[in-house]
Amino acid sequence: MRKAILHLKKSDPVLRGIIERVGPYRIEYSPPRYETLVRSIVGQQLSGKAAATIYKRLEAACGGGELTPKAVLRLAPEEMRVLGLSQQKVAYVRDLAEKTASGEIDFAALERLPDEHVMEALTSVKGIGPWTVHMFLIFGLQRTNVLPSGDLGIRVAIKKAYGFEALPAPADIDRMAEGWHPYCSVASWYLWRSLEDKAGL
């Protein structure tokens, strides 16, 4: 990771300042499994706290422990709605469960695929778009060169750090990040951390 940090510091003075303020790279990964993707679906357009509460309810309703497709499919959609999931998210979580149980989505195989093929496979599931796949690539599959340029946190961090008057468009971020390759995931993590009150601690 030292090579990535040195590359980013050299290629971008603003990012260098963020890295020095935030400190060591301490990303926390999740296992690249069904449950991690469900967690991302549950978290769509919700605060972290609300998403965590709903996910814990779903986990408990499925018997606790590792969340599996079979356990989810044993729940009726109405039972899932009571847990706090929207009707759309119930459909998304169940579609992913069905495709995983049938073997159409093979999480072990995803680990061996290039990023673009992971994107193609997972966006075939209802409710999974580029943002969700980007989160899975970074935090589940531990890919180092993913740039979620449409992520609101990334856009806000760049606006603040680079002095933009308005939120930059994803295309603008893609252009300005050309020098970050092949470590865009590392740059993204630092940008997210730059927004935290205690980022420098």
Image (cartoon, helix red, strand yellow):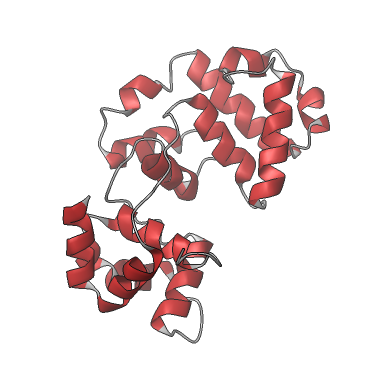
Question: Which residue does the image show at 36% across and 73% down from the upper left?
Answer: 172
Pick the residue in front: 122 or 52: 52
Q: Is residue 200 above or below residue 50?
A: below
Residue 38 image position (x, y, % from top left): 57, 32
The percent coordinates of residue 175 (x first, y second) are: 28, 71
Res. 97 image quadrant? top right
Asked whether, in this view, residue 125 is left or right of residue 20, the answer is right
Query: Within the image, what quadrant is residue 112 found in?
Result: top left
Please report the residue visible at 46 percent of the width from the left and 61 percent of the height from the top. Answer: 192
The residue lying toward the viewer, choosing from 128 and 196, is 196
Residue 125's x, y, as percent?
51, 33
Q: Is residue 182 visible?
A: no
Q: At x 21% / y 56%, what residue is drawn?
A: 4
Compare residues 163 and 94 and report the one nearer the observer.
163
Q: Residue furthest front?
A: 201
Instruction: Reply above or below: 173 against 26.
Output: below
Q: Tell me residue 143's x, y (percent).
A: 30, 42
The count of marks equals 0
